[in-house]
Structure formats: C-alpha cells, structure tokens
Amino acid sequence: MSMAGIYVPPRRRRAVLHRLPAGAKIAALVAAVVAVVAAADARVAVAAAAAAALVHPLCGLGVGPALRTLRALAPFVAAIVLFQWLVGDGATAVRVCGQLLAAALLAAAVTASTRVTEMLELFERLARPLARVGANPRRVALVLALTIRCIPMVASAWRTSREAYLARGLRGRPDAMVVPVIVGLLRSADSLGEALTARGID
C-alpha cells in the first residue's frame, strides 16, 4: 500500500483501471451508481454488486480491496437487511443492499487504482470554479484528500484497539475499545497538524 493506505499497485502490466485517468474513473463511477439506483430493481442491484466484485481481480487489483470493503460493510449490511425486512419486504432489502455493495465496491476499485496525488490534482481542478466566490481550490482539494486519508486511519485505530482488547482477555465490553480509539485518533490528528504547520499550511 501507499502512504495513503488505500492505493494498491497493479499486479500485472495491463492493469486497465490504473491506466485510466482519475476523472474518467470518477465519471464512470457516478454514472454506474446513478444507473443502478435509477433501475430500482433487486435483480439489477445484485448483478451490479457481483460485477463490481469481479472488477477487482479482472483489473489487476486482486481480491484484497474487495474483501476489505465487504468486511467493513458487513455489520451495516446486516443491520439494513434486518431493518428493511421488518419495515418493508425481502425484495426491498435485497435491492438496497445490492445497490450499497455495488457502489462501495466500485468506489473501492477507483480509490485502490488511483494515487492520492492524482486524486488531489483532480479535486483541485474541479474546485477551481469556487475561486470566484473566494474559496481556495488547493485547500478544498487538501481537505478532500485528508478525508480520504483518514478512512484507513480510523480503521487502523479500531483494529489496534481491538487487538489490545482481546490481548487483555476482555470479553463482552465493546465500549472499552472506544476510548483508546479516540485517544489514538487525537494523537494522529496532533501529528497531522504539526506536519501541516511545518509545511506552512495553517
């Protein structure tokens, strides 16, 4: 992984997604998600989720990014299925979960195949019109890039806290992991702030 923790180097020379520009990948991602949501069909949603999962190994990313995405989404998907099943019907639960998985897996494929610097340049170009109303495109791009960077940081803090929790032999008290996660994130935020200050960014 790269410094950002989400970029995955191509596993073969002809890695199609890695060769595409970031703008084309973002546009395709938005178009695919809009099409799946607009179809509003459980069969289309399931087929889209399956196709999104196949994008990873077929495009030289391996199965790692797809598995990490599915693992992170598993609790949310289970809760959504249960909720939709109770208040709606089975077809709606399948459709909503299929749409969610398709969008998340496609987004994971885009981020795993795009370097943060390339994404930062794209965000800066897209934010240039905001300069007319006084916004700084570079700072807008920096905020978006830091947001992307913080996603694996939170996951890493949670993993570390959970390993320490299990090593202490604790069971049945998941709330005991919350404080260490918050402390770890605050320390990371302090380090990040110092690094930005050292580079003249206030």
Image: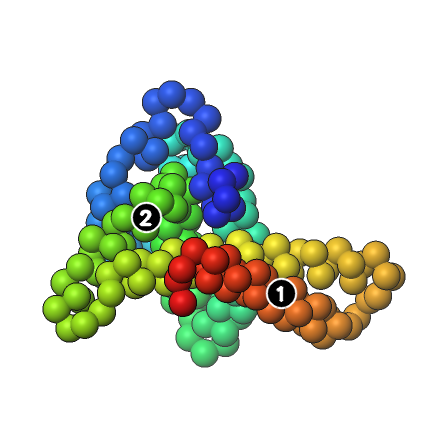
How many numbered marks have been drawn onto this rendered protein structure?
Answer: 2
Task: Name the element at disc 2.
Answer: helix
Q: Which mark is residue 119?
A: 2
Residue shown at the point (27%, 48%) measured from the top left: 121
- Report whether 104 appears left or right of 3: left
Task: Name the element at disc 1.
Answer: helix
Above or below, comparing residue 91 to residue 13 in the picture = below
Dots 1 and 2: beta carbons under 8 Å?
Answer: no
Q: Which quadrant holds residue 177? A: bottom right
Residue 136 place in picture, x, y as percent = 24, 65
Residue shown at the point (29%, 31%) measured from the top left: 19
Q: Nearer the viewer, residue 58 or 200?
A: 200
Disc 1 from disc 2: Cα separation:
26 Å
Residue shown at the point (64%, 61%) measured from the top left: 158
Q: Quadrant of the C terminus?
A: bottom left
Residue 88 visible in the shown view: yes
Q: Residues within 10 Å of mark 1 (few under 14, many from 20)?
A: few
- Report whether 167 appears left or right of 149: right
Given the current orientation, which residue lies at the most extreme bottom position? 87
Q: Which quadrant holds residue 179? A: bottom right
Amino acid on which disc 2 is placed: Met
Circle 1 residue: 187
Q: Nearer the viewer, residue 110 or 73?
A: 110
Amino acid on which disc 1 is placed: Arg
Residue 178 place in picture, x, y as percent = 68, 72
Residue 124 place in picture, x, y as percent = 25, 55
